[in-house]
Image: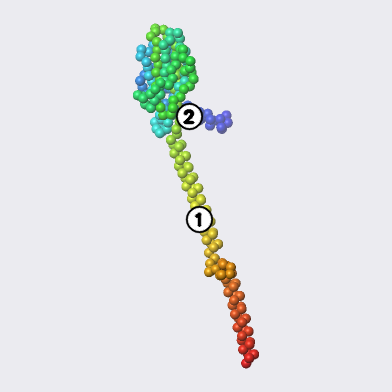
Amino acid sequence: MTKGGCIVLLFTIIHATVAWKQSLTFSDCWSIYYVNNDHSYEITWNGEEIYSPCQITFHGYDTDNVLNEYKVCLRASNWNITDAGSEVELTYYMGDDVLDDYLEKTYSKHSMSSATEQWCSEGNKYVDVKLKTSSSIYLQGKITLQVSAHMTYNYYKSITWIIGGTIGGVAVLILLVSMVIVICCRRRRQSAGVVYNTPNVAGNTILTQSGAQQLGGRFFLILLFLSICCFQAKKIEE
């Protein structure tokens, strides 16, 4: 066996060890059972008469991750009602709690819909499964009901996404602010040598520091040239 096959087999064994299915009958009435990804149920009825309607309640809940939410799913893997079970009726109720529920599904020997089709509740709801039978000394059929759960809300994954998104948003904001600061600093350095003089009447000319230095040097040369000329003319007159 390859290394990858060993890993898959080991994961399957671990998951099978953690996940488990609990067996119930319709004599386990008026109890609440918690169902989640790792804990499912199988309810069996072997055709005997139930003297009063039996109700079993399920709720998606995980004691290790109490803030996660689940929907409860029901499916009959075996649905066989005999003629003696003409009054057999399987009903599903759903609600926010045990005392506040409403009818969702009704199955019987003559119903149009089939209990073998999977039905799932809304997320984080209580589900009541109720079975009523006929009054008969004969066996009325056989029902095997699979009860499972599917997660609809993963609190810890949602928190991880929120924290990751927040950190990512802050990082992008810091990057944008840093870029703006760098751009502003570069512009300040480029404009640090600019000197704005009073514009002249002729052309409203703005002189840079280097232009002013060049003009000052030329003006100094002109003054020096005029001084030499005046000195030579004075010597000639003497």
Q: Residue furthest bottom?
A: 238
What numbered label is drawn on residue 181? 1
Amino acid of disc 1:
Ile
Closest to the observer: 139 or 74? 74
In-image side of 191 versus 20 (left or right): right
Above-or-below relation of 187 to 125: below
What numbered label is drawn on residue 14? 2
Q: Secondary structure at mark 2?
A: helix
Amino acid of disc 2:
Ile
Q: Position of residue 167 (x, y in %)?
A: 47, 45
**Residue visible at 49% across and 50% down?**
174
Q: Position of residue 179 (x, y in %)?
A: 52, 53
Could you tell me if residue 34 is visible in this image?
Answer: no
Q: First in sequence, mark 2 or 1: give its number.
A: 2
- Name the quadrant containing residue 133: top left
Q: Nearer the viewer, mark 2 or mark 1?
A: 1
